[in-house]
Image (cartoon, rainbow, N blue to C red):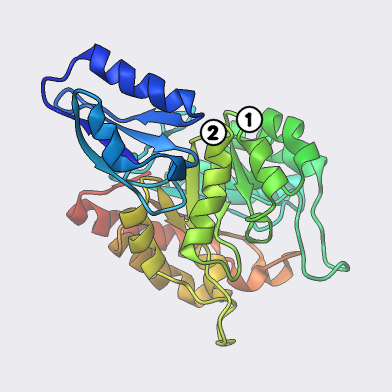
Amino acid sequence: MIIKMKKGSSKNQYKKVVDFLESKGLEIKDVSSEQVTIFGIIGDTTQIEPFDLYAFEGVGDVTRVSTPFKKASRSFHPKDTIIELPNGLKIGGDHFTLMAGPCSVESEAQLRTIAKAVSKTGTKILRGGAYKPRTSPYSFQGMGLDGLKLLRKVADEFGMLVVSEMMTPNLLHEFNQYVDIIQIGARNMQNFDLLKMLGKTDKPILLKRGLSSTIEEWLMSAEYIMASGNDQIILCERGIRTFENYTRNTLDISSVLAVKELSHLPVIVDPSHAAGRWEMIENLSLAALAVGSHGLIVEVHHDPEHALSDGAQSLKPKKYENMVKKLQNIAAVTGKDVQ
């Protein structure tokens, strides 16, 4: 529910309405500006009849919002959320932010080679998996804590930030220590205990869309994190499961447009997992920029033929460099800032 106060209404009139609603156990989300006083009501609003609120002096308009995701909804937060990172990077708005690196951290030498290559393109966020959820229990599961430490060490060498996937709540301490952006993978998008815990950290959260999740379910997962206190969320479209098996997944490029209409949260695209084929990544990345996404997370490997995971969907450094140049040229025309 959204309440807009009349022009010229007093602070005391505003306070009376807010006090009444809070006495009902409801939460207030104020999004007022210098021109208008407006706020959202979060919680079980079924106990409140919108028309009854006109009894309060100063109330102008009362609108019931039907979306179940209140904090993530653009109705409650009209302006785009821009995530500010420690090194001055911003995700959201007119910024197009690049994250790149290997699927899995395999060794210090491997990670340093890739980080050096992607950092030369201006990419300032190093991605890499230390803990790897794999379909097969016999596949490489990652280096664990040693992998996290290597990510931090190598990223610091090249002035980069770290994004890596966390799978269980008991790893939060380690991720707070070594990681700048905590990634929640598709398989954990509805791990609600994990999402609630992430609401208690001040780290930005990269939330990937589930394998077969609707856009509403995806935004409701973001709502879990926000309801627990953390509103620094970056949504990531990484392809969904359909009947098609030529590609690894089907990139739902229209979801970027839908999310931007429904939510104020920034949304990026993962073309690597969407395609599963390195030769498609460049064009899918250009499409992501064209539809207005706020960035990419791309897998890069200097020796993909011998990668321990997902070599087939990893770009070689030179191909990544060429792709970044194309993105920069297009972004210059559209007013985007590639970083």
Q: Is residue 89 above or below residue 12?
A: below
Neighbor class of circle 2 (other Cα within 10 Å; few <14, some 14-19, many 20+) is: many
Q: Nearer the viewer, residue 229 or 167?
A: 229
Q: Nearer the viewer, residue 86 or 43?
A: 43
The dot on residue 230 is 2
Residue 72 visible: yes
Percent position (x, y) of residue 40?
35, 35
Figure quadrant of residue 47: top left
Disc ID at residue 200? 1
Q: Which label number is shown at residue 249?
A: none
> Looking at the image, which residue is at 58% across and 74% down?
276
**2 and 1 marks in contact (CB < 8 Å):** yes
**Residue depicted at 20% across the width and 55% down the height:** 334
| Above-or-below relation of 182 to 252 | above
**Residue lying at the far left of the rendered structure:** 8
**Secondary element at image label 2:** loop
- The image shows residue 256, relative to residue 78, as above or below, that is below
